[in-house]
Amino acid sequence: MAVSLWKSLLQTTKSRLFLQRCVSLYNRAHGFEEEEIKKKLQQFGGGSINLSKEDNGIGVLTLNNPKLMNAFTGTMMLELQERVTELENWKDGKGLIIHGAENTFCSGSNLNAVRAMSSPQDGMNICMFMQNTLTRLKRLPLISVALVQGKALGGGAEFTTACDFRLMTPGSEIRFVHKQMGLVPGWGGAARLVQIVGSGAALKLLSGALKVDPQSAVHLGLAEETLPSSDETRSLEEAQAWLNQYTKGPAEVIQAVKKVVTAGRELQFEAALRAEKDIFGTVWGGPANLQAFAQSTKHK
């Protein structure tokens, strides 16, 4: 009896913590020195993470460091964390498109920063910092799409897996090149890749450092589709049109849909049910629900 009550309490606690999206995976108990690594990352500047939020509830996050194929500098990692916090608090948000400046996605980490912070402790702290940030990105109550133009390499490939969906343009590629650097993914990309394509396909992509073109990505389930245009502006418009299919309706309802799906993916079944119950309670009797009842729109 006591064991059963303890398990129930633990699952309820997990469910409540899950709903607090900004809770980090790592803290001091895991040896993570966040403030220390932030000071070090601040020393490696260049590039930016730009966020625009449209009135229709769609945000566009741009990785902007085109001289280095949008590779992440230290300050870009810090800015990404800030943008994620901003998105967590966007009450009117419904969807998010992430893309790279000047028609390429991202080539991973800036090697200058990597070489300067090559100690095992620094490496682990960067790993935990980016896993924290990208996990929060994945858990955003927004439907997110990575628009892959050009190349998504290494950490850039990992970044795409932190989105709900991936759209690719003609001639683009996703490639997990970590093995060629004597590494494995460290930003959570391997774990998320297994969830997306399965362990067998993930093992092939990682161990072979395979180039994944749009056709192969769609076949594997890594991408939803290939967009018609490779033009930077036009493909962004096409991605927005694609995302609009899934973001029609009130923001509070779209966010609730994303939350219940995330709970089902990340929590044990009983805890997911409890989370779903709590999320259901936030929209039942709400404005959208009452309006739907009044208009009898269930089957329209």
Image (cartoon, grey):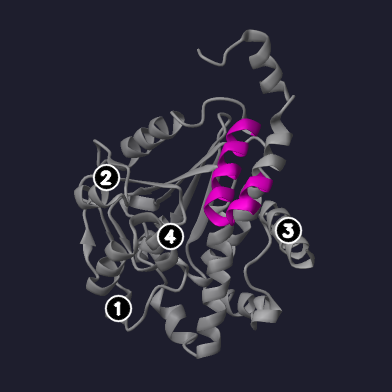
Seen from the viewer's position, the closer of residues 170 and 9 is: 9
Per the image, the residue denoted by label 2 is 169
Q: Amino acid at mark 2?
A: Thr
Label of residue 159 in the image: 4
Q: Amino acid at mark 3?
A: Ser
Mark 3 vs mark 4: in front: 3
Q: Choose the circle earlier in sequence order: 3 or 2.
A: 3
In this picture, which residue range is highlighted in magenta?
252-275
Q: Choose the circle earlier in sequence order: 4 or 2.
A: 4
Q: What residue is at 38 percent from the left and 37 percent from the top?
A: 239
Label of residue 8 in the image: 3
Q: Choose the circle earlier in sequence order: 3 or 4.
A: 3
Is residue 253 part of the magenta span, yes or no?
yes
Q: Choose the circle earlier in sequence order: 3 or 1.
A: 3
Q: Choose the circle earlier in sequence order: 1 or 4.
A: 4
From this viewpoint, is residue 139 visible?
yes
